[in-house]
Amino acid sequence: MSDDGVGLRILEVLAGLAPAVDGARYLDAGTLGFLLLPEIEDSDSLLLLDAARLGAEPGELRVFEGRAMDEFLAGNSAGAHDVNLRDMLDAARLTGGLPERRALVAVQPGKVDWGLSLSPAVESAVASAAAQARAILERW
């Protein structure tokens, strides 16, 4: 889905940064929906990397942490997934399994349509998004 794949590209860059962050596990969530719920519930921290409707120019990057992430997702359907992030986090909250430390690194997509590559504006945000994600992991 072209720019909607930015989360996976960020994950690939983040996972390739050395040295590895102790205790960090990288998972391509793709469109697994509620199959991810046990992964979320078993985590101390949750860092999401995704395309999101930010009402901004394509490639703009924003980071939402904790309650700010919850509030952002409450008003947005981020990405083109079977079950959106808000639904999954609400389910984790209901079971008492929502990680206290949680953040979303989001990039505004330009084109969400059939395609295998990112638009130039979104591709140019990948390195910065990975750096932001790495900083969050190191802080945690």
Image (cartoon, rainbow, N blue to C red):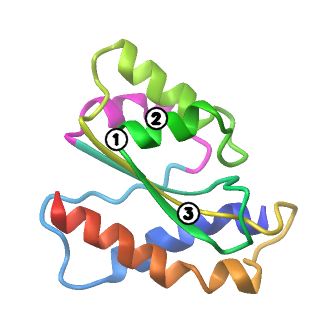
Mark 2 residue type? Asp
The image's mark for residue 66 is 1
The image's mark for residue 88 is none
Question: Mark 3 packing: few (<14 Cα in 10 Å), some, or many (20+)?
Answer: many
Image position, residue 4 (x, y; %): 70, 60
Question: Front-most of 61 and 4?
Answer: 61
Distance (Cα) linking label 2 and label 1? 7 Å
Distance (Cα) linking label 3 and label 1? 19 Å
Main structural element of the magenta stretch: helix, strand or loop?
A: helix
Mark 1 residue type? Gly
Residue beneath disc 3: 7
Q: Mark 3: which secondary structure?
A: helix
Rendered position, 75 above or below 95 = below
Q: Range of the magenta residues? A: 30-44
Answer yes or no: do the residues labelled 2 and 1 have beta carbons within 8 Å? yes
Residue occupying image coordinates x 19% and y 40%: 44
Image position, residue 77 (x, y; %): 68, 39
